[in-house]
Amino acid sequence: MNHAMGGYHPVRWEMEVRCDAVASLSPQSLRALYEAGCRQINMGVEKASDQHLKGINKRLTTAEIIAACDNVKSVVPDLRLAGTFILGGPNEDQSDIEGTIAFAKSLRLDFAHFYPLEVYPGTPFFQEVFDGRSPTAWAYEMLEDDENCWGEILYETKRLSKDCLLEWTQEAYRQFYRREEWIERFTNSTQAEMQETALKVIERWCEDRFHLTPDEVQSVADIA
C-alpha cells in the first residue's frame, strides 16, 4: 500500500464533485482529501463540447473538465478519477457520440461510465418527448416496455434510435476499457484479490444492466 501521502487511514471513501470545483482545489486540499481516506473523485463530465454541454443545461466547459483531471493527477496521482458521460441528445448524431468517447479516452480518468440520455419528468426533454402528457404516462411506458432493458425512457431522435444508443453505449465501454494503456494500469496497480472482485462486478453489471448472454458477458470480462 502506498503511504507516500501520509499514514494509514482505516476508512476509504469516495466523493462526487463538480468538475469546476475539482479544478479549483488547491494542492493542499487535494493532499488533505487523500490523507483523510478519499481514494476516488466522481465527476459528471457528460459531453465533449461546450455546445452540447449547454444543450443539456450543464454549466460547465471542456476546459474546466480537462483542468480538473490534470489538477488531481499532477498533485495526487494515486487519487482515482471517474467520469460519467451522456450519449445522445438534441442535434447529436453518431459522430458526436464518437467525439464523446474519444474525449473520455483523452482525459486522465481511471474509470468512465457511459449512459444514453434518459428522459425524466420535470425536465425540458420530458416536455419535448411526452408533449403535455402527465408523468403517469411516462411511468406506464417505462414499466410496460418489455424491450427496455435499461428500465428508463431514452431520448431518441431520427438520427439516434434507442437501439443505436444502446449499441453505442456498449461500444463506448469496449473502447475505453479495452485499451492496452488501461488494462496495463489496472493489472499493475490492482491486487489479485481486487482484480477477481472487479471481474465479478463487471459480469453481474453486464447481466443486470445490459441483459447480455453468458457468452457476451464472458467476452466483456475478458477485456480486464
Image: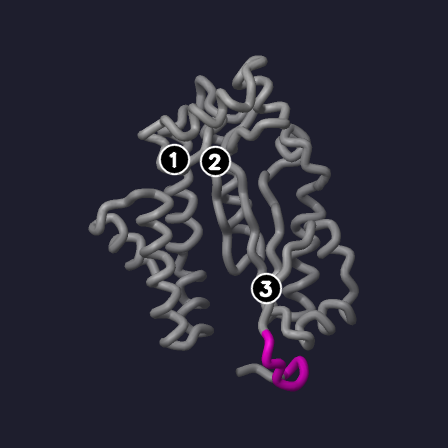
Name the residue tied to disc 1: 166
Left or right: 167 as drawn, with respect to 12: left
Query: Callout 1: 10 Å neighbours few (<14), some, many (20+)?
Result: some
Residue pushed farthest top? 132
Give the spatial CA distance, label 3 vs label 2.
24 Å
Task: Please give the range of residues in magenta.
Answer: 4-11
Q: Which mark, by number, is residue 116?
A: 2
- Label 2 sits on what residue type? Pro
| x then y, percent, for residue 188 | 43, 74
Q: Is residue 121 left or right of residue 155?
A: right
Q: Hey, which quadrant is residue 53 in on the image?
A: top right
Label 3: how many Cα within 10 Å (few below 14, some 14–19, many 20+): many
Going from the N terminus, do you reach mark 3 or mark 1 first? Answer: 3
Which residue appears at 66% of the width and 59% of the height?
Answer: 70
- What SS does tag 2 mark? strand
Measured from the top left, where is residue 99 in percent x and y? 52, 38
**Which residue is rendered at x = 55% and y = 23% of the image?**
135
180 and 44: which one is in front? 44
Find disc 3 in the rendering and name its residue.
40
- Please check the rendered image and state whether residue 96 is part of the magenta-colored stretch, yes or no: no
Is residue 179 shown above or below 126?
A: below
Whether tag 2 and tag 1 are in contact, CB under 8 A, the answer is yes
Name the residue type under label 3: Gln
Q: Is residue 165 left or right of residue 71?
A: left
Q: Nearer the viewer, residue 108 or 5?
A: 5
Residue at screen point 50% across, 57% down: 111
Q: Residue furthest front?
A: 136
At 44% from the left and 21% from the top, the residue drawn is 159
Q: Quick one: 193 or 111, which is closer to the camera?
A: 193
Q: Please report contact status of discs 3 and 2: CB closer than 8 Å, yes or no.
A: no
